[in-house]
Amino acid sequence: MNLFNNIIWWVNIAIIILFGSLFLFQLIFMALCFLRPKKYKESNNYLKFTIIIRAHNEEDVIKDSIVSCLKIDYPRDRFNIIVFCHNCNDNTANIVRSMGIRAIEVNDFDSKHQNLSYCMKLGIDVLKNENFKTDYFTLLDADNQVDKNYLKACNNAANNGVKIGRVFENSRNLTDNVISCVNGLWYIRDGKIACSVRSALNLGCVMNGPTSLIESDILFNKWDSKTASEDIEFTLNRLLKDNMKVEYVEEAVIYEDQPTTLDDVFKRNSRMGGGLNKLFWTTGIKCIPYFFKNIFNKKISFGTKMTAIDQYCNIAIIPGSLIACIWFPLYYIYSLLYTGLVGPISIWGFGTYNLHWFTIFIVCVLAGAFFIPFWFQPLLSYLAEKKRLINVNKKIMWISIFIFPVFMLVEALAIAKGIIFKSKWKKIKRSSTIIKQ
């Protein structure tokens, strides 16, 4: 039994090191959270933008999304709005047309193609066949609304050389309840801490579907995403194939609808977890050989090379979450039961560990590696970004910050569920909150 205890001890240490290493960049970002992201010089050269809204049976929210786009403070003759209606069997397309906006109905009922990547491919093909002209595309989901200065900020970035960008992902229903708040804080934290520091350090960000700014030639000629995680797949493909990274455009703001029930959280995160796990094993894992292959390549910037390591860690957290959800509870429950019922565990060359030691160790690990970081990040993000947050109920906000670490556990469990059990797209409840500007 002593041999078994020693073996699983060292397996546990190895898993702690490997899993902990995946958070190395996140720790760096927290330590450097005072850094400011790149700012883009204001430009009066108004490029032509096309806002693509992707919709699948979104008759409840599509009008609000279009109205927010029509209120954008940007020359109206310099931007288009087009809605890709993907396999819709409701009134979405008719609502779009009744507002004077173009709806492109794209249908592909192959069970393997029921995701945004094929919605994009089919819609883009229609525009390519028409020889459609625009300078840049921005991508939205049907439940998104945008800030009135959204395109001005995108235009400034584009005129300053940004080819692929990610904007700030705010929340339209941040404090509908605690669940929507912790979900919204997750994305706000990602923008304030991770994306801001990446930008300051000249690292690339992760392109998130409804926050994407893409030069037209790139979207027309390089849309090669086929998975349910089309945004991150596109990010990885551009890095690995074209040595391109995603820039952060902090001043461009979109407002996303956040789930308000645990059931909807599980639906969304399970689907994302399953898709990202597959993407890691097919594409994400290639980031490591990419880094070593190009480590001495002077034509590729140091920031682009380090982006590959960051992206690897970022996506490897997904399969890592599955391992963590299975291994750590089993190991520490076993250790507590063994030391409590049988006696201390003797580790060769390190000493003897009893129930008291394991209890203290678990508390310290949870505090140092879990609770403290995941209290610090949402708290800092809220304090730093509160002027940009809307519809805020302070009571719900503070409760959400307090329970944020628990949300991380829920997210990890949802991801693990999505990896183990195949999850399909399921519609979630939409908020009726409208952004007033």
Image (cartoon, rainbow, N blue to C red):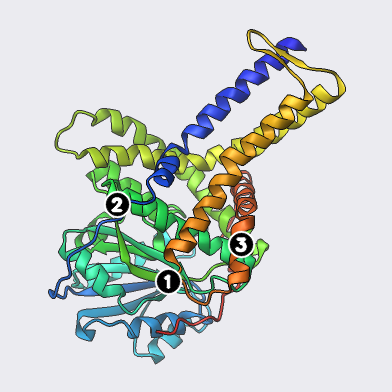
Is disc 2 placed on a helix, strand or loop? helix
Instruction: Name the residue rendered at 57%, 59% in the picture.
Output: 268
Q: Earlier in the sequence, mark 3 or mark 1?
A: 1
Which residue in the protein does label 3 denote?
Answer: 400
Q: Are marks 3 and 1 in contact (CB under 8 Å)?
A: no
Instruction: Name the residue rendered at 60%, 47% in the picture.
Output: 412
Q: Is residue 72 visible?
A: yes
Instruction: Name the residue rendered at 50%, 52% in the picture.
Output: 377
User: Where 305 falls versus 117 (above or below)?
Assistant: above
Is disc 3 placed on a helix, strand or loop? helix
Judge by depth and name the residue closer to the eye, 79 or 410: 410
> Amino acid type of disc 2?
Ser
Cα–Cα span, label 3 and label 1: 18 Å
Q: Position of residue 127 (x, y in %)?
A: 26, 71
Q: Are marks 2 and 3 in contact (CB under 8 Å)?
A: no
Which residue in the protein does label 2 denote?
Answer: 199
Cα–Cα span, label 2 and label 3: 27 Å
Which label is found at residue 405? none
Judge by depth and name the residue closer to the eye, 52 or 32: 32
Report crowding for label 2: few under 14, some 14 to 19, many 20 or more residues within 10 A (C-alpha): many
Report crowding for label 3: few under 14, some 14 to 19, many 20 or more residues within 10 A (C-alpha): many
